[in-house]
Image (spheres, rainbow, N blue to C red):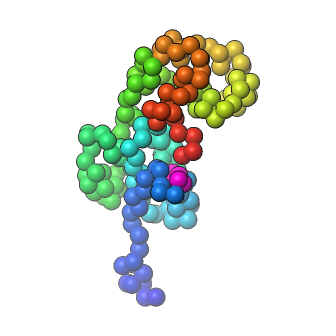
Amino acid sequence: MSNSLRKRNQIDLVVMDVCTEDGSSGLVSAEKIKKLHPNIKIVIMTSMPEYSFISRSKKAGCESFWYKEMGDMEFLDVLDRTVNGESVYPDKSPSVQIGEASSEELTDREFDIIRELVMGKSYQEIADDMNISVNTVKGHLKSIYAKTGYKKSLQVVVDAVGQRLVLPDF
């Protein structure tokens, strides 16, 4: 294949949803693409307010991130800026209600605890995974309960998954 033909067929930009049609994670696919083709620019998009998607996109090496439901950035503007070498990310995930609290009121560490609970882990397993004590796990849960108005971790888990704040499969 001639150099000019190869250059013409080169991929410069991939736009990928976090949640793909077959139930796979676009974030996992993006990371694989970046390892094989580091010069390809990737824009990840989603309508899910999952708290970890922005940081995970950055970790995977994606250039930009766009929330479909948020009107503060136009999609074509994000694509244009990304192609021109800019990295475009929202400042934060969309805010949703979880119990009596806005998701913005919960800390990243509290979301980490919730994610571990969603994955079915015991307090001891959470403590081991996060290198903290069981009492610290319980302290975070007490704070989560105070903010959300819930009294049990199952209520928090059901609401967090129902509001799409924590999606363990993606």
Q: Which residues are magenta?
A: 23-27
Front residue of 107 and 8: 107
Q: Is residue 84 left or right of residue 54?
A: left
Location of residue 127 with respect to 85 vertically, above or below: above
Residue occupying the far bottom of the picture: 2
Q: Residue at x 62, y 29 (%)?
A: 117
Most common secondary structure along the magenta stretch: loop
Residue 87 on the magenta span: no
Q: How many marks?
A: 0
Q: Residue at x 37, y 29 (%)?
A: 95
Question: x, y (%) of residue 139?
Answer: 62, 14
Question: x, y (%) of residue 131?
Answer: 70, 27
Location of residue 81 with respect to 120 vertically, above or below: below
Residue 25 on the magenta span: yes
Q: Residue at x 30, y 39 (%)?
A: 70
Q: Is residue 66 left or right of residue 156?
A: left
Residue 109 appears in view: no
Quadrant hosting residue 16: bottom left
Question: x, y (%) of residue 49?
Answer: 42, 37
